[in-house]
Image (tube, coloured by chain):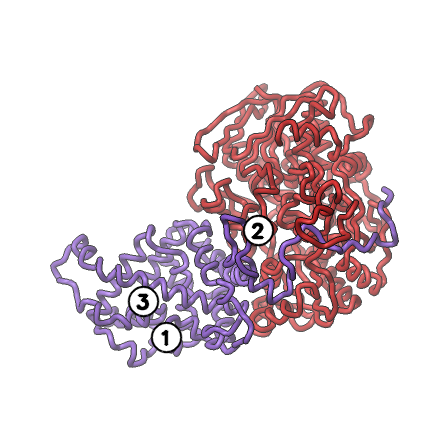
Chain colours: A purple, B red
Amino acid sequence: MPDRLIARRTFLARIGVLGAASAVGTAIPLTLPRTATAADADVLLKPLVDLLQPLLAELSRDTLSGLVVMTCPGPDRFSRAQGTPRSEPGAIEAGAPDFIINALDNFLPFPDQIATPLATALATALDDTGIPLPPSLHSLLLGQVNTLDQALMVILRNDQAVPLSLVVALLLNLLATQVNPLAVTGSLLSPFARLSLDEKCRAFELLEGPNADLLAVLDSNLPEPLTSSLAGLLQFLAGALLEFSAFGAHNEFAVFDPGTKELIERPVGWELSGYQPDGVVDGWNEFIGYYEDRTEVSA
Amino acid sequence: MRDVIVIGAGGGGPVVAKELAARGLDVLLLEAGPRHADPESEWTHLENDANNPLSGFLRFGPENRDAPAWYRETPQNSFIWQLSGVGGTTQHYFGNSPRAMAGVFAGYDGPDRDAYDTAHLFPFTYEDLVPYFEWVEATLPVQTAAMGTKESVFFRGCEGIGLPVQTSKTTTEDSFRPQENAILQPGGWAGKITGRDDPRLRFPEATGCTFCGYCMQGCSKPRGAPRNLAAKRSTDNSYVPMALTADVWADGGRPAELIADAYVTKIHSEQRGGETVATGVTWRVGATGEHHREDAAVVVLAGGCTEDPRLWLNSALPNPNGWVGRGYTDHFFDWVIGIFDDDTGSSRGAASAARADFPGRGGMENVGLTPGLQQFAATFSESGIRGHYANGRGPEGPWDGPAGRMIGPELKDALMNGIDRLLNVLVITDDDVEAQNRVTLSAFPADEHGPVPKVRFHQRQRSARTLANREFVARRAGEMLRAAGASKVVRVDWPPLLLHVQSSMRMGTSEEDSVLDANAEARWVKRLFIADNAALANSLGGPNPTLTAQALATRTAEKIFSRYFGGDGWVHREAPVVSTDTRISERLAELAL
């Protein structure tokens, strides 16, 4: 049992949950009563679940902030962390983290039949790669780790409560610590966000390619015939996450007033690219004639 | 009991509806998505509001934008970009209306006859289809594109690599030209002034294309124009208005009835005299969840290449040779970006008004985009991330470095150089019909309309001819951009972007590998016709498919009329009414349509 718990602690560190929870370590009960039934445990875990959910939301946001600056770095701390700071506004200023979280949680029609087993895999997977944890992640006692893990399972196994953004963030963090084990700890909340741009690209290479280790961890809970769909789905995700980050960092998402259907401010992407210098138009002085003055052709 | 029920008001369905309504038949046109009856108030020219494939007003999903888009399984790096709503995917298309290559039809005997997918030819000749091309070209109408800055740059590049200019509608050699576009040419002040809320840019001071640059966001320009005089001839602006007003412009015509938010979940059939015969449909009303059923003498399926096989399979219709959903072709697009030191006008004017064609190989066209979509296009790759990993690919050629998605500082610098200092080239491959690329039903649980489609593409195992064609055209695109003066050229190497999708319910010469006969009637279900891109026999040699699908749908309407309603064809003996006809505008105003 201690071996399993140690492996699980390593896994929780790799997906970023342990690091995020360490900040509130004193609020995590040492253990639950041995006699507690499953229903009792849920009640007893409720305060911890309530504490954990905003922490996980913050972990997601940090992870996805680390994602969107891949396509549009700026003057923010995530761009600095990846080693490509820029003086002009970037994805963070453009509101791209909110765009990608909103897209993943509210609009991407990702079937529960995949999302739920993925979440379950994250809830139960063990890590035996032997990544040594730095002393800062030992601040939680094993009993507390166990309690934290049970609370995480309550969240991940409740498919009503699991935002897809969280599942994606935990996946990216898992890949991040595969690329660079040292990313389990550092100045930002998320292991993925701690990577250099080179390392983030390597994480995407793993997601996009045939990553047997990742699939082995994730597909153990997928019923047939969905197992064969998982590899393809990860390839789709590897493409879509970057494409949607790029789209979200450069469109008008953050400055659109749906009530008036007008812009509140000039979008970052328009400013960067010099698009529509005077805003939306009804037409352009752009007609320069017909090639060789030909307005129609024969059959 | 209707005469005809048409499933789908996208690029093809409204063509049949309009033609048969004009003959006086009782036509019901059903559309799963919304109808945007007043784009001026319902649409914006903003790319997230319009084009977000998950939540935009031009997406593939129900009318209620708070509800998720409709999920389709794509178990590979790929993207399906189809639209629901009246007008379907033509709502955001660029109006490009080149004819198919003559070499993809039966009976072609030109010197390049072996250069095409000769195993999957159309079951009739090019000459057979020409009168239908002409009919659609006159109806929309299709016109030679006006030129803006980005076209002049594209033409300069084509001249620079020694291509001749094509001056006919039929392509006979490697050549470039202004697009033949279903976009009204600029008149009055259109294209001559820049502005917003300027009365000179309102109809009728301005007519036709105002060069606003928002083709992707649906066309409602010039402001104040009757719907049938909006510049871009998407079917919501052309064929649908004609179908709804057939009584005023056609002798004996009868207006078609259009019902939007009506998702067809089943095609009904019965056995008659040893044959399976289509008898009607059931649809689900999105707003209420209620189901309705109506019968018809003829059913026309035009839901799109992905949805047609899904509905067929969910209706348990016969599929004896297994070709329902197979042979899905997509022009295996690629994307090459030129970065210039001078103005290219990329974001201004019609999205694509210049092209070059390479018979037997494919073609290429210029495309101007808005910033978010520009960056989406630049990060959509099968070759990994440039400078980091190549995902087993990363081809090199007359572009800078290996192909792949730009990212980080390189991506940002490319855009900050100026969106109007870019020139994008869409590589359009003449790809082979391959049985392995197909639509099946997904193992994921059904949605409210039944089991959902799964689209499988074996993108790295396409035929040698398809792969060679793609490389040939990509190289020509790179050379053209260099000749036009690009200081940097990047090839992205797209995975399948599924928007020129074709032939998933193909017509063919052989019963072994086709679903439809030469009349576009299902071989194993009588009184059931297919009238969209799915009916096309092959990928046309590369040209954009809408015009050919519409010409074929016109021909199919004649076949339906002569076979089941005892009439004669009209294309060979009548002149078409143009969709901009004043009688249509006036009737639309009377009906507040």
**Mark 2 crowdedness (10 Å alpha carbons): few <14, some 14-19, many ≥20:** many
Pointer 1 residue: A184
x, y percentage for residue A81? 46, 77
The kind of residue tagged 3 is Leu
Q: Which mark is residue A126?
A: 3
Q: Is residue B312 above or below residue A89?
A: above
Task: Give the residue at x 53% y 63%.
Answer: A249
How crowded pointer 1 is (Cα within 10 Å; few <14, some 14-19, many 20+) is rated as many
- Name the element at disc 1: helix
Q: Which residue is mark 2?
A: B51
The three-letter amino acid code for the residue at tag 1 is Val
The quarter of the displayed image where residue B5 is located: top right
Do marks 2 and 1 share a subunit? no
Q: Is residue B120 visible?
A: no
* Location of residue A123 with respect to B503 vertically, above or below: below
Q: Where's residue B293, x and y in %?
A: 50, 25
> Which secondary structure, mark 3?
loop
- The amino acid at mark 2 is Asn
Instruction: State the separation of the CA atoms marked 2 and 3.
Output: 41 Å
